[in-house]
Image: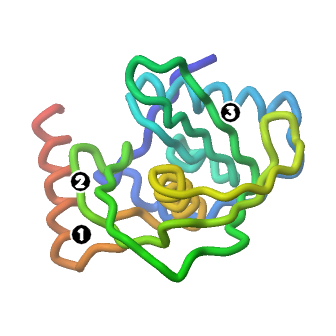
Amino acid sequence: MTVRRILTVDSDMTTLKQVSAPAAAVDDGLRRLMDDMLETMYAAPGIGLAAIQIGEPVRVIVMDLAKKGEPPAPRFFVNPEIVSASEETGPWEEGCLSVPDIYEDVERPIQVRLRYLDYNGAVVEEDADELYAVCIQHEMDHLNGVLFIDHLSRLKRERAVAKVKKAARADA
């Protein structure tokens, strides 16, 4: 497994805004990509990562919502789709590895039903709520070229990008 560079809004906005293509098949090559993504996500550290965030425009997500002190519980989502979403929405504070150190409330459906292929290519359909629902919607937005800051007001979005750019210049 290889830790890859995570693209950020200060220098890679064009790539991050790409719409990802469906994966043709769950094969050894795609599993290597998922393994690299998981290693990258853990190293960051984060709880979810979409392939486009490491420059791979394919509809793949990895996630691990295990709490601190719990054993790792990695999840893999190939070609995920939301089958249905609750009408009820709620705010949840979100952050993103591609928008480092920015956290804002985003309003999303509190429950979704999703369908995807797992690490071995089996079809899975299940319900997600709370953090799982928020995280899968956030990561699926990435697959469609949408960042969580795109759900914010124009002013908050511009401030977030400016803050990330300023931090990147200070680190350079």
Which residue corresponds to mark 3? 34
Q: Residues within 10 Å of mark 3 (few under 14, many from 20)?
A: many
Q: Mark 2 or mark 3, which is nearer the start of the sequence?
A: 3
Image quadrant where one finds the N terminus? top right
- Taking the spot 65% from the left edge, 36% from the top edge, the residue there is 75
The residue at the point 47 percent across, 55 percent down is: 130
The CA distance from mark 3 to mark 1 is: 30 Å
In the image: residue 154, left or right of residue 86: left
Q: What is the three-letter code of the residue carrying label 2?
A: Tyr
Question: Residue 140 location in percent, x, y?
Answer: 58, 60
Q: How many residues crowd mark 2 within 10 Å: few (<14), some (14–19), many (20+)?
A: some
Whether residue 50 is situated above or below residue 138 in the rendered picture: above
Q: Which residue is mark 2?
A: 103
Where 16 sits versus 82, above or below? above
Q: Nearer the viewer, mark 3 or mark 2?
A: 2
Q: Which residue is mark 1?
A: 157
| Secondary structure at numbered mark 3 | helix
Task: Identify residue type, mark 3.
Answer: Met
**Is residue 94 positioned above or below 172 on the image?**
below
Q: Quadrant of residue 136?
A: bottom right
**Local secondary structure at mark 2:** strand
Of residues 21 and 96, the one nearer the viewer is 96
Foreground residue, 68 or 102? 68
Whether residues under marks 2 and 1 lie with C-beta atoms below 8 angstroms apart, the answer is: no
Q: Comparing marks 2 and 1, which lies closer to the viewer?
A: 2
Left or right: where 24 falls relative to 151: right
Task: Please name the residue shown 33% across and 61% down the image.
Answer: 92
Label drawn at residue 92: none
Cα distance, mark 2 to mark 1? 11 Å
Q: Is residue 139 visible?
A: yes
